[in-house]
Image (spheres, helix red, strand yellow):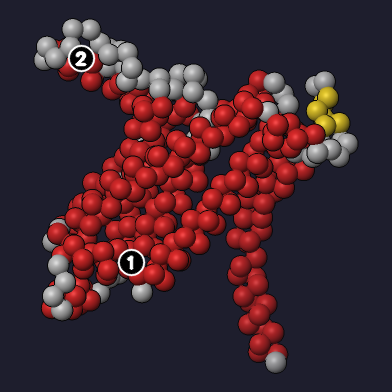
Amino acid sequence: MAKFDAEARAGLSLIAPPFLYALVILAAPLLTILAYSFLTDGYLEIIRDFTWTNYAQVMSDPIVRVVMTRSLIVAMVVTAVTVLLAFPVAYYVSFVVRPERKSLWLFLITIPFWTSYLIRVFLWKVILGYNGVVNSSLTGLGIIDEPLTFILYNVNSIVITLAHAYAPFAILPIFVALEKIDRSLLEAGRDLGESRAMTFWRVTLPLAMPGVLAAVLIVFIPTIGDYVTPEVIGGGKIPMIANMIQVQMLALDNRPLGSALAVTAMLIVAVISLIFLFLNRRFLKVRQ
């Protein structure tokens, strides 16, 4: 018993520092935002009176609904595009590239991480700008007479930028899941007369779904809360929910309403993520 208590104390002393660190860094800000969302905004001060007014305003404001809907649609489109483009890359690296060259490919995939996210966003602004790389190339080749004005400051440019920014985050988890697949299972499927397409659909894809699921969540969750890309690439003309939160928190100094917007967005993301997890489990059961 004494030995067990000593081991328990040793285990607690081992996990206590990271637990306290996570509590301070993660839980404290979230609890602060949650507490602020139930307070009342006053002139240059926070009135500490409990109220549901902030959430009522969030639910009833048509502008909030439009911005939230746009944020969800953009996040879903970015997630779909990123994962669909990432899967072939991960599949190629896992199944086609020789083992001794896989490290090189993974190294190349992580090259975007060498620069900050903000720099990559500004690079896309340079590429898609009025006098950017795309317009200069098309004009130089004689394809167009004047630079295109519709390739920047719209939803499409935001989707392209976000898909590029989060591509490595989608490729790596899918690659890890594909690497764990026992190749003998694929050979068994082929020996039983299955085509390559059916073997992929019935064996490879279900076994790779944990990686796909991780990629979807890794891309979807931060994308819906992205602030920089809509501000820079969208030119501030296509605000998403993070931009609206920033306006309430800083420009209008309405921290209670901004906190209510943040909490509402987090709840919506949590519900959508749980629904996706449930559908993924149903898919795996059907495939089995």
Residue at (70, 92) in percent of width and height: 1
- For label 1, count other residues whose C-alpha is less than 10 Å away and answer few (under 14), some (14-19) or many (20+): some
Check disc 2 and give the amino acid type.
Ser
Which residue in the structure is indicated by mark 1?
A: 206
Front of the two marks 1 and 2: 1
Distance (Cα) linking label 1 and label 2: 45 Å
Location of the C terminus by quadrant is: bottom left
Relative depth, front residue between 15 and 178 = 178
Q: Is residue 122 above or below residue 94?
A: above
Q: Image quadrant of residue 195?
A: bottom left
Res. 95 in view: yes
Residue at (62, 75) in percent of width and height: 11
Which residue in the structure is indicated by mark 2?
A: 136
Q: Is residue 53 above or below residue 95?
A: above
Give how far across and how far down residue 139 sits, in percent: 17, 12
Check disc 1 and give the amino acid type.
Pro
- Whichever of callouts 1 and 2 sits on the residue coming sooner in the sequence is 2
Residue at (66, 80) in percent of width and height: 8
Residue 66 shown left or right of residue 88 in the figure:
right
Relative depth, front residue between 213 and 286 = 286
Give how far across and how far down residue 245 sits, in percent: 62, 30
Q: Residue furthest toward the right?
A: 49
